[in-house]
Image: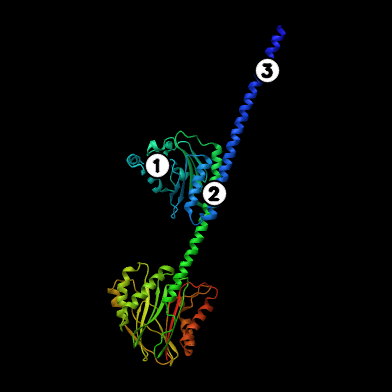
Amino acid sequence: MTTTIVTLLASLTIAIVCFIYICRYQKIINELKRQRNDIEKEELRMFDFLKSLGETLTQEGGTNPGTLHRTIVRGAAMVVDAHGAALYLLDKSKDNLVSEYQSEACPMLIPVPSHIAEQSEKVPNTINSYRRLTSIGKDWGPFGEALRARKLLKIQNIGANPHFKNADKKIHQGVSTIIAPLCYGEKELGILAVANEPGGENFTENDYEVFQSIAEQSAFALGNSIVHLEAVEKKNLEKELNTASEVQRILLPSEPPKLEGYKIMGLNVPARIVSGDYFDFFEINDEHLAVVIADVSGKGVPASLITAMCRSVVRANAINALCPAEVLCRVNEQLFPDIREDMFISLAFLILEKGTGKIAIARAGHDAPLHFRADAKIADPVQSPGIAIGIDSGNVFNNAIKKHEIHLKKGDILLLYTDGVNEASDIRGEEFGIQRLHKTLISASPKGARNVISEIQASVNVFASNVAQNDDITLIAIEKT
């Protein structure tokens, strides 16, 4: 009897022990299943994030950055299962981080002053407005620390962070966050952060590792988007510049003017898509023709805009005018207020008299024209006083500029040019210079104005060889027939 009881007790003990082990084993199995389910869900969320990121980039991420920013923020919060996320990117100055997108439930990650918090009690949207509109220095606090170290930064309670000591405690106390630097190659882009409100679960090591992958993929997507957007902007800019170039070419004379006793040829070769030089021919009256050549300091779009403005002002002030100096005084008076301090216009304005060879000239700081005399086969500069337009408001300019008259005889040629001609340089840095220009003019003049233009252009091209044109080239040749 005793033996039977002992056997039963032993069997019962073994059964209880087995049951306990089975329960523990089942508990372990259930925990492993739960962990596996969590991992599978996390993997699915990560897959959905990467898929959304790829689709956004393919469809519109390059031309609509806002869509990409929203995808990154929402995806980061979803994958890590955080309350919210925020994306701050560097502005054009590279000195400040600007809030590009934050999920609605994202806790505040920058210090909120007490007066803003107090105001929010009366105006509910104050905090959201502060969140959207407030930028912060790139070196500030946790953001700057993550960027400088190029490593993730985990903070369990930002309210206890020293950089929040003057901020409103109720808003920041207990907020936890992970901040990731976003870098594309050597280029810093900004930061991405996920955050939980007070009472939320602390971020785990697994969250930390997963978020690092999210940040790396986000930085790559943002970098590619920026490159794509810059390429699109460059293409659009080139298109606009080409349109501006076409407009500028329309403003230049399409064919030589017809004036009894003269042959006149002009040429403009921009150094860039648009030019800071211009030339113009237009009738003043039945007996007189105006010839203009100008060079705006600088190059590209700003200079081209000034040339267009100058052309209009010159034409408006030259109606029925027979004194070029008076015309330029009025032009300077009108243009001076609108020209930047670091810009000016050198311009020569000529009035040709029909048939006679008589030319009146006023020179506002422009290179002296060269007068080829057919009888002596020499070329002399036509010196006349004057300073550039846009340097002085009127008193000095008006006193400096004077009308000068010359007389062309049959076979004579008057050459006007901009400094892109004489300052053209070769591979050694040597300039084409006035002496070569004189020599080419004397050599080419016997064959007429057209030959002068083509010979000078060819000589400059041969001299400069493979060196890129550094400045706009403009030429006008006036031949007395």
Amino acid, disc 1:
Pro
Question: In the rendered view of the protein, which quadrant contains the N terminus?
Answer: top right
Dot 2: few (<14), some (14–19), or many (≥20) neighbours within 10 Å? some
Dots 3, 2 in contact, CB < 8 A:
no
Q: What is the x, y in percent for residue 210?
A: 56, 42
Q: Residues within 10 Å of mark 3 (few under 14, many from 20)?
A: few
SS class of the residue under badge 3? helix
At x 47%, y 34%, the residue is 200
**Residue denoted by label 2:** 52
Against 150, residue 203 (above or below) is above
Residue 117 appears anywhere in the view: yes
Spatial CA distance of label 1 from label 3 is: 62 Å
Q: What mark, if any, has residue 63 been given in the picture?
A: none
Picture coordinates of residue 201, whole percent (x, y): 50, 34
Q: In percent of the image, x 54 and y 43: which residue is there?
A: 212
Q: Please name which of the two marks, 1 or 3, marks the residue nearer to the observer.
A: 3
Looking at the rendering, in which quadrant would you find the C terminus? bottom left
Residue at numbered disc 1: 111
SS of the residue at dot 1? loop
Amino acid residing under circle 2: Ser
- Residue 328, quarter of the rendered image: bottom left
Whichever of callouts 3 and 2 sits on the residue coming sooner in the sequence is 3
